[in-house]
Image: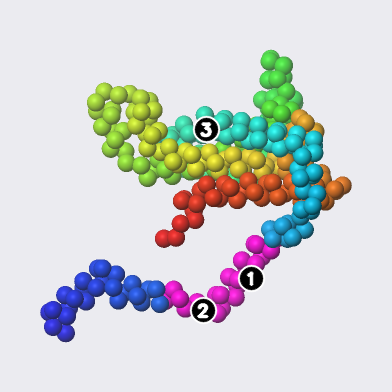
Amino acid sequence: MTTTDKSAAAADTLEGGPRRGRVRSARRGVPLPLLLPALIGLAFLLLPLLSLLVRAPWSTLPEQLTSTEVWQALRLSLVCATSATAVSLVLGVPLAWLLARTEFPGRGLVRALVTLPLVLPPVVGGVALLFALGRNGVIGQWLDSWFGITLPFTTTGVVVAECFVAMPFLVISVEGTLRAADQRYEEAATTLGASRFTAFRRVTLPLIAPGIAAGAVLAWARALGEFGATITFAGNFPGRTQTMPLAVYLALQNDPEAAIALSLVLLAVSIAVLAGLRDRWMTAS
């Protein structure tokens, strides 16, 4: 091969010519031992969702969705999920900044404990909240005797349970965004005389706003769909603690068509959340 040919081959490689063509050809050919399990896995994930659409009572759906019980559960779910997200923002963003920007002994352990609710069974989380914040709990007994505050089996208890399971989603999202953000802007602000809090408020927050928004959406969606911790810590009282997932569970025993209608609402919300996060998760590389 002459020097000219070598230069041309190198240029093709840098510009993605023949090499890119080979990569695309490799992507077209899918081995059968991989294709079959992939299709089975796809069907396993999609068929239950499609079954909801097939079995949905379309003729009576408007009547189902406009009933008093559904609107009570929907309103309570929206209020509690939004409140839990607000609390998660107030507490979770500083916690994410602490994990991403500071060095302290045991930071890895703290991060593991923060993410523990992600893998902890929700019912176990509800039991833990009950023994911590219940009327006879480690902290709850003092809240009751000193301030007269009782959290279990109240609407506030729903917010607490949803915040417990949803906040880690926000913390992880914001911490990842903070680690990816360029710290030189913060350092420049502090060099010019700004305090660390001012640099965080005026420089860091605008930089990580997309990550905060994505984490808030994830936390809101997780709070909206919370079941185990809610029913364990807050109970299932219509109009007070019965959120949409709890209403689905109750309706499934007495009125399957109403359960399907409620499930369709939650499915639509989940699809909307994925559509809102499509730039983060659904773009091809």
| Camera-side residue of 239 and 160 | 239
Residue 263 relative to residue 191: left or right: right
| Camera-side residue of 35 and 163 | 35
Q: How many marks?
A: 3
For the C terminus, the image quarter is bottom left
Q: Residue at x 54, y 41 (%)?
A: 217
Residue 29 relative to residue 7: left or right: right
Q: Residue at x 19, y 76 (%)?
A: 8
| Camera-side residue of 115 and 171 | 171
Q: Amino acid at mark 3?
A: Leu
Q: Return the mark for residue 89.
A: 3
Q: Relative to residue 95, is residue 13 depicted above or below?
A: below
Q: Is residue 128 visible?
A: no
The x and y percentages for residue 80 are 66, 33
Marks 2 and 3, how far apart in space?
Answer: 46 Å
Residue, disc 2: 31
- Magenta stretch: give its range: 26-48
Task: Assign a secondary structure to mark 3.
Answer: helix
Residue, disc 1: 40
Circle 3 residues within 10 Å: few <14, some 14–19, many ≥20? many
| Marked residue nearer the N-terminal end (1 or 2) | 2
Q: Return the mark for residue 20.
A: none
Marks 1 and 3, how far apart in space?
Answer: 39 Å
Q: Is residue 141 magenta?
A: no
The x and y percentages for residue 205 are 40, 33
Task: Assign a secondary structure to mark 1.
Answer: helix
| Marked residue nearer the N-terminal end (1 or 3) | 1
Q: Residue farthest to the right?
A: 254
Q: Residue at x 28, y 33 (%)?
A: 187
Q: Relative to residue 103, is residue 145 depicted above or below?
A: above
